[in-house]
């Protein structure tokens, strides 16, 4: 071989090596805490399902954005009748499911008929009971007729529970999910990982990612080691107690925001002495949110009502009952308990509940309320507290989006019965004008705050740790899931 040829080959090899080194990565290895029990979000309540497949493998007629707003999805547009009870959707053309079958209005009708069927196992079936009928106008047009106006209808059909599935594959989606999304399912190694790859026939804007691997890592220490070793590129839900490890490490970025999890000191409003407003007000004045936020290592957001701070309709009511022990003692005395009283505080397993319970017990002791802490596992907590309403106080995060309507249900486990809130909520449900909805929901927020229905503590944080070269992750989480469509590597 001549010197010229050798030099040419060496130069070519150097160029190829340099190009490979500079090539932008396109794969993502994502650490998640829980393994989903199945992969069909229309047939299971576990958030872990949505984290893997919602908006990634499966899509809905509309998309819910990071700020909670609704934008076009599989439907490119829609119109609403004058009476607000009929929605006509125009579907995108050329959409196919991952197995090559076509998507059209018949699939939309099949999806919602399946949700509403007598044997439906959809976890949020009640949200869709407002639908009277779904009618196919033509292959790309479908009409929904509602029994009444529903101001949350568009939001609810954008949730993971309402993603569009095909009759050809619906029965197997639990194990082999087939949707229309930008990623298609490749494999599920149970106990270890799920692998998704880019859908080359995707109808919309393709992702910057060509492959995503979800690794199931249940404890913070193992997640930490996986991040530091480069075995995963990031996680959306990292243990706040260990975030300091990554705060000054330039190889990582911490992305913190809020979730839909309103963490509350849930109070049995049907059990004495909590039936008394002054008792509930006293407890509200005895809660030091600064101490409680420390339970999330400073990453929780204080709340004064049952609504997510990242939502446009949120009203900051944390000043309704400021921390004031003397005022709390005075209110207890006025309520007939100058020396306080004893009660139980039943705590489910999450660390935020157990830690917050200890803090609240210490705070309440200062005004004479002596709390017996009872640690419970999930099954007995769900049966005793949520099911049988056998409790005085408990601490829990309510993670469902826009769930203020629970305060209009006197049979709900904390037993709040206020006809004014019930009437306002009924009006809210039947209102579609955004400005009027905002007024109504802020009025409800104000009433439940003043009534001190529950102790409003903090919004559960979303604490993500990511490779510093990744961008496009959602800061806040208005829905269950990890939306991948904007995530990309930077130089």
Image (cartoon, helix red, strand yellow):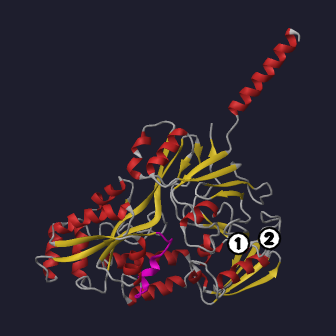
* Residue at mark 1: 164
Q: Residues within 10 Å of mark 1 (few under 14, many from 20)?
A: many
Residue 490 lies, with reference to residue 169, above or below; the image says: above
Name the spot of residue 472 as percent of width and height, x first. Answer: 59, 50
Total marks in image? 2
In the image, residue 355 lies in the stretch drawn in magenta: no
The image quarter in which residue 368 lies:
bottom left
* Closer to the camera in the image, 146 or 367: 367
Can residue 205 be seen in the rendering of this structure?
A: yes
Numbered range of the magenta stretch: 399-411
Q: Work out whether mark 2 precedes mark 1 in sequence or the reverse, and give the earlier one.
A: 2
Residue 84 lies, with reference to residue 257, above or below; the image says: below
Secondary structure, mark 1, is: loop
Which residue occupies 41% across, 41% down?
Answer: 245
Which residue occupies 79% across, 54% down?
Answer: 200
The image quarter in which residue 274 lies:
bottom left
């Amino acid at each position: 071989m001549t010197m010229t040829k050798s030099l040419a080959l060496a130069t070519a090899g150097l160029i190829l090596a340099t190009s490979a080194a500079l090539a932008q990565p396109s794969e993502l290895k994502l650490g998640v805490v829980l393994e989903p029990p199945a992969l069909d979000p229309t047939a299971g309540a576990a958030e872990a399902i949505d984290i893997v497949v919602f908006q990634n493998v499966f899509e809905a007629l509309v998309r819910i954005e990071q700020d909670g707003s609704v934008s076009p999805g599989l439907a490119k547009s829609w119109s609403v009748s004058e009476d607000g009870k009929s929605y006509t959707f125009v579907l995108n053309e050329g959409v196919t499911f991952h197995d090559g079958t076509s998507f059209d209005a018949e699939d939309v009708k099949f999806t919602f008929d399946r949700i509403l069927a007598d044997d439906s196992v959809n976890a949020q079936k009640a949200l869709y009971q407002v639908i009277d009928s779904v009618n196919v106008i033509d292959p790309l047009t479908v009409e929904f007729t509602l029994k009444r106006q529903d101001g949350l209808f568009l939001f609810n059909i954008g949730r993971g529970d309402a993603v569009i599935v095909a009759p050809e594959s619906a029965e197997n989606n639990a194990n082999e999910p087939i949707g229309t999304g930008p990623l298609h399912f490749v494999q599920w190694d149970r106990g270890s990982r799920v692998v998704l790859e880019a859908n080359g026939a995707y109808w919309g804007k393709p992702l910057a990612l060509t492959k995503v691997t979800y690794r199931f890592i249940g404890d913070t220490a193992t997640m930490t080691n996986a991040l530091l070793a480069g075995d995963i590129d990031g996680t959306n839900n990292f243990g706040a107690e260990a975030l300091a490890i990554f705060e000054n490490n330039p190889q990582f970025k911490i992305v913190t925001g809020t979730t839909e999890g309103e963490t509350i000191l849930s109070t049995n409003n049907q059990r004495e002495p909590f039936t008394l407003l002054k008792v509930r007000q006293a407890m509200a004045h005895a809660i030091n949110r600064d101490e409680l936020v420390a339970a999330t290592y400073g990453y929780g957001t204080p709340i004064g009502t049952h609504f997510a701070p990242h939502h446009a309709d949120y009203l900051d009511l944390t000043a309704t009952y400021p921390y004031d022990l003397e005022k709390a003692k005075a209110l207890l005395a006025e309520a007939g308990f100058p020396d306080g009283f004893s009660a139980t505080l039943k705590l489910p397993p999450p660390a935020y509940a157990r830690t917050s319970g200890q803090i609240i017990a210490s705070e309440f002791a200062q005004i004479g309320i002596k709390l017996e802490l009872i640690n419970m596992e999930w099954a007995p907590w769900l049966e005793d507290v949520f099911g049988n309403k056998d409790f005085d106080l408990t601490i829990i995060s309510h993670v469902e989006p826009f769930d203020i309507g629970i305060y209009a249900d006197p049979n709900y486990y904390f037993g709040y019965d206020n006809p004014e809130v019930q009437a306002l909520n009924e009006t809210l449900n039947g209102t579609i004008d955004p400005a009027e909805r905002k007024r109504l929901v802020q009025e409800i927020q104000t009433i439940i705050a003043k009534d001190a229905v529950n102790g409003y503590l903090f919004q559960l944080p979303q604490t993500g740790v990511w490779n510093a070269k990744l961008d496009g992750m959602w800061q806040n989480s208005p829905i269950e899931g990890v939306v991948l469509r904007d995530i990309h590597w930077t130089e």
